[in-house]
Amino acid sequence: MPVGVCALAQAVILWYMFAFIRPAGEQAFLHYSAVLGVDLVGPWWRLIFLPLVGAGIIAINFIFSFWLYDKDRFLSRLLSIGAAACLLGLVFAMYLMTILNS
């Protein structure tokens, strides 16, 4: 189940990136804080790091999860669920970045 959630979340992140982020020469908003507002501005291509971070989280957590499965199944499942939770947070972050930069 967490593998499917991670795959779906990564697909949604990539879809948001390709559907709403357009290459432009101007700066893009990269981080928004509720207290400070926009607090990080940079080139638009830095938004590509968000899906790369998601792929890294999936890869690292599931490698450790498969490695730990024979030793401790509970910890293995916890890592998989943690990866899914992180990816859902990244989906929300990509959603906010597309709203902020549109």
Image (cartoon, rainbow, N blue to C red):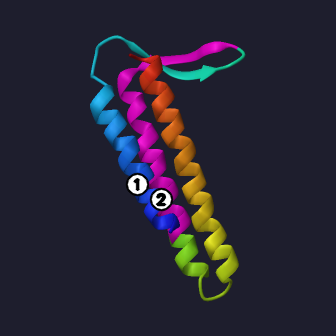
**Contact between labelled residues 1 and 2, with CB atoms less than 8 Å apart:** yes
Q: CA distance from mark 2 to mark 1?
A: 5 Å
Q: Dot 1 lies on which element?
A: helix
Residue at (68, 83) in percent of width and height? 72
Whole-percent x, y for residue 39 in the image: 60, 16
Q: Residues within 10 Å of mark 1 (few under 14, many from 20)?
A: some
Q: Is residue 43 above or below residue 75?
A: above
Whole-percent x, y for residue 74 in the image: 69, 78
Q: Dot 2 lies on which element?
A: helix
What amino acid is found at the position of numbered circle 1 in the picture? Answer: Leu
Magenta residue check for 49: yes
Whole-percent x, y for residue 10 in the image: 41, 50
What is the chief secondary structure element of the magenta stretch? helix
Task: Please give the residue where the numbered disc 1 appears in the rendered image.
Answer: 8
Residue at (66, 68) in percent of width and height? 78
| Residue at the limit of the structure toward the right, as seen here | 35
| Residue at the limit of the structure toward the bottom, as seen here | 70
Residue at (59, 83) in percent of width and height? 69
> Looking at this view, is 55 or 10 the one in front?
10
* Residue bounds of the magenta highlight: 36-62
